[in-house]
Image (tube, rainbow, N blue to C red):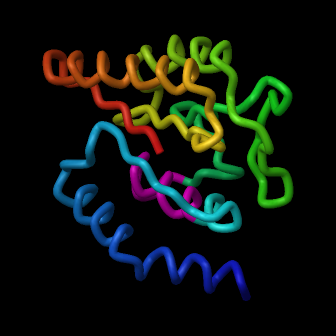
Amino acid sequence: MAELDMKNEILNSPTWHDIETSISSGSLPQSIGVILPQNAQYDFLELFLPRVLGGNLSVENLTHPDVIHLVHEDDEPFTPSKKKMPKKAASIGNCRKILAELSINPISASCRICVIWNAERLLKPAANSLLCFFWLMNCRTALSGWKIAAV
């Protein structure tokens, strides 16, 4: 019952309304940051990923070829579940490794999505490597029509 309540709370939030409006109008921003309590993160992704990756798409266990989960190496390989959430933020090594994956074109959706778990705990070098990458991707997107969304 709590899961349904959390999903309803997300769906009725002003933030979800803004995201839904962006998706419907085809103007989803290059990067999206959503700060949620840990018990709501999985529910948000269950709602968000199918909506962005395709309306009829089933995203089981939050896995999809165009969804990349950025976690600490201690949590790899990572398959998200409500019972096993990552505890540590990604290291700079993980961030650099994932940047190569994000650079390729989407496999089956119109964009790639990077879920940055524990983003608030990233050390400065790791956060800076991601900021530089997303800045460069924004420049490329303007030139080539690529679209990468980060949550």
Residue 139 image point, x, y percent: 21, 18
Q: Residue at x 47, y 37 (%)?
A: 113
Q: Is residue 148 above or below residue 46?
A: above
Residue 151 horizontal side relative to residue 69, left or right: left
Magenta residue check for 131: no
Q: Quadrant of residue 112?
A: top left
Over which residues does the magenta segment extend? 44-57
Residue sitting nearer the eye, 147 or 131: 131
Residue farthest along the front direction in this orientation:
124
| Image quadrant where one finds the N terminus | bottom right
Q: Residue at x 63, y 67 (%)?
A: 40
Residue 51 image point, x, y percent: 42, 57
Dominant secondary structure of the residues highlighted in magenta in the image = helix
Residue sitting nearer the eye, 54 or 38: 38
Residue sitting nearer the eye, 81 or 132: 132
Residue 106 image point, x, y percent: 42, 26
Q: Is residue 111 above or below residue 7?
A: above
Q: Quadrant of residue 134?
A: top left
